[in-house]
Image: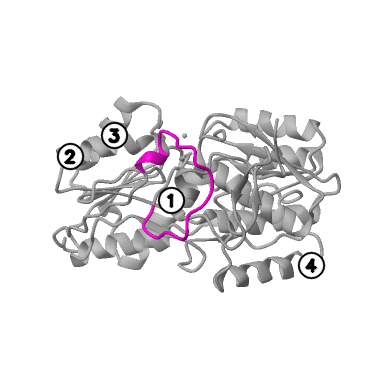
Amino acid sequence: MFKKLISFILVAVMVLSFTACGTKSETKDSAKTTPAADTSKMPAVAKDKIKVAVIHIGEPSSGAGYTYAHDQGIVAMQKALGLNDNQIIRKNNVSDTDAVKIKSAMEECIEAGANIIFGTSWGYMDTMEELAKVYPKVIFAHCSGYKSNGTNFVNYFGRIYQARYLAGIAAGMKTKSNKIGFVAAMDVKNSEVTGGINAFAMGVESVNPNAKVYVKVTNTWFDPSLEKQAAEALLDAGCDVIGQHADTTAPQLAAQAKGVWGCGYNSDMTKDAPKAHLTAPIWNWGAYYTEAVKNVIEGTWTAKNYYGGLAEGLVDVSPLSANCADGTQAKIDAAKKSMLDGFKVFEGDLVDNKGNQVCKKGESLSDADITGKMNWYYKTVVVQ
């Protein structure tokens, strides 16, 4: 969310950390990237009494993209835990730039008896922080972002950059022009988006060191028209594969209309652009939603931030389409195995596109660096 996030952006700060290295510059969000320290438990809620609310930036019935992926996670949670429809409260099409609307939607959920509220877009963060103080018995869980309070307000996100790297392999093997476009929701200041672009570019480089990734920023988490325009500008500049950190299928449809290729995001977009789509970094949000709600029911929920990845089944790439180059599956499988065996995407000798060394040989970026301080582009990234 893109969504995010989206500024998604972020960006998400979580509990685990590796050996830190990288840029010394601080941003307004990177200074607040400490995870929740308190692990206060909330009282158990009977399964037949619990009510789960989710605030969406878009419309789940779209069948693809960010909101759809989140709602599929809610559906999976409901099925896994055996909750009925009356126990799920959805608020759809809640703009993450309208604080009044956000607050109203969340207060309506609380009045309806919500025990836990999932806010799926970046711009919900400040309102959730505010309401968490007013309603201490309600759990507020915010997707992406960087804020939490250690009691009833947490954030959750994941290592989507792992899946971005894998998708980059598909893009790098498919391009003929060695110009790969990327429609970005936010600019370099947003670590969530920037980290994904960098990982994608590194995946491309791993199989095609001659290719570059050209970025066009929309400055919005959700705008199909702007997403399409950005993709078309990149296509007109000679890009023959389009990646995206954008909520909708618009960039993939633009690629298909041009007769070239693309890597979507959030959900498998092959059905939407069957002649163009290669694969997409995807989320299995049900892995988190099921765990979180189950813990509330059992009285074991604690105010810990969540940051899962391939190992937890939270992220992956969608099944490769027939559009992919020969050998792509084998390359992706090998890279995925390396990650599960300990390979960190952001490790070793890394240089940004201004020539600065952002990580040294034998070191790796910490989770806090990746989610809150990645305000630089990898050396093969070009901003349009």
Q: CA distance from mark 1 to mark 3?
A: 23 Å
Is 109 located above or below residue 101 in the figure? below
Res 133 label: 2
Tell me residue 217's x, y (percent).
61, 31
Read off the magenta span.
Answer: 14-32
- Mark 1 residue crowding within 10 angstroms, few (<14) / some (14–19) / many (20+): many
- Residue depicted at x 82% and y 36%: 238
* Residue 316 occupies quadrant: bottom right
Q: CA distance from mark 2 to mark 3?
A: 10 Å
The residue where tag 1 is placed is 368
- Residue depicted at x 18% and y 46%: 113
Is 75 located above or below residue 215 in the figure? below
Would you say residue 91 is visible in this rendering? no
Tell me residue 109's x, y (percent).
24, 41
Position of 277 with respect to 294 (left or right) is: right
Identify which residue, 260 or 60, lies in the foreground: 260
Identify residue type, mark 1: Ala
Identify residue type, mark 3: Thr
Looking at the image, tell me whether mark 2 or mark 4 is earlier in sequence order.
2
Res 127 label: 3
Res 327 label: 4
Membership of 283 in magenta stretch: no
